[in-house]
Image (cartoon, helix red, strand yellow):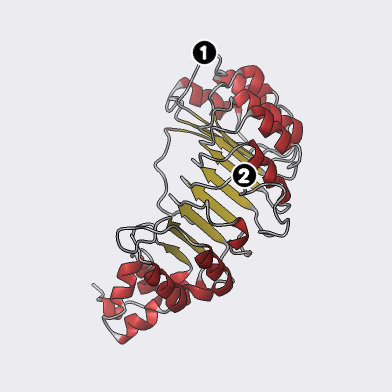
Amino acid sequence: MATFAELPDSVLLEIFSYLPVRDRIRISRVCHRWKRLVDDRWLWRHVDLTLYTMRPKVMWHLLRRYMASRLYSLRMGGYLFSGSQAPQLSPALMRALGQKCPNLKRLCLHVADLSMVPITSLPPTLRTLELHSCEISMAWLMKQQDPTVLPLLECIVLDRVPAFRDEHLQGLTRFRALRSLVLGGTYRVTETGLDASLQEMSYLQRLEVLGCTLSADGTLLAISRHLRDVRKIRLTVRGLSAPGLAVLEGMPALESLCLLGPLITPEMPSPTEILSSCLTMPKLRVLELQGLGWEGQEAERILCKGLPHCMVIVRACPKESMDWWM
């Protein structure tokens, strides 16, 4: 059996990549070789800081010493602890990320109070922005904001952002590079607001609406009206009926359709009705049904047999992936 000393650098780097940031820094003290490997650019492409309550000076040290131009994606919590009072993420830190990390493409913020952080302070290189359980101000994402903010933004994930509402959704229309939108638990968004916003975002290629108060029928109707070129749809089946699903028939570019349970009502389309609608979608290659309780049932057999050109996935809702950068 090979010892650590006999392993090639590439294997050690792969092992080190699974270590939390704090442990990566600690192992750099083991020997000169490990110190050199910890300094390797490859090891600092993806950084997860949500595991720690971190003082601001520690965060600044990491930024200057390890991350800088190496950083591609960053995940961090909203509290940078300093004593008993925990200051929130600051505009200065956001601006520093933009200045010192020119290759930063993905930023995931968790449980953060961003009410005092203007969107203009976010790194302009971002292509993906994820907000999970974050607070934002009314001024965030409003349409009248500077149109040059986040010019490269292609994907935005809004997961349990309680202040997010129709006006914010309308403000997303100014991001002309946006191609992927995920709304999770955004209960203030209405069907009227969704319809009006999608009308100006016909360029979207992926839309996910999960755990919202919007009905699936209303969401699909807005999609069929305005997103004729959408490639991927993922939504919760709350309020889904056979006529509601039928509005997607003939969608010319749709490649992937995912329906998530577990809220099944008597109006829920039967497997035969789902099959009938899917057969009219010329480019559909993936049909995924999660949490509907159809695993191993007759429904799965009907869909797999009727859609031989598709990958049909029928399963329970999976656990959240730990590989957050994927």
Q: Secondary structure at mark 1?
A: loop
The kind of residue on which mark 1 rests is: Pro
Helix, strand or loop at label 2? It is strand
Residue closest to the far bottom: 32
The part of the image, by quadrant, that contains residue 44 is bottom left
- Res 72 visible: no
Image coordinates for residue 212, horizontal then vertical, percent: 53, 31
Q: Quadrant of residue 256?
A: top right
Rendered residue at 23%/72% (across/down): 1
Of residue 319 and residue 119, the one placed in the foreground of this image is 119
| Image side of residue 56 versus residue 117, left or right | left
* Residue 153 x %, y %: 65, 56
Q: Residue at x 61, y 19 (%)?
A: 273
- Determine contact: label 1, label 2, CB under 8 Å: no
* Position of residue 206 in the picture relative to residue 57 (left or right): right
Please provide percent x and percent y for residue 104: 56, 66
Circle 1 residue: 266
Near-viewer residue (71 or 185): 185
**Three-letter code, disc 2:** Leu
- Using the image, determine if residue 145 lies above or below residue 229: below
Q: Residue at x 51, y 39 (%)?
A: 162
Q: Which residue is mark 2?
A: 181
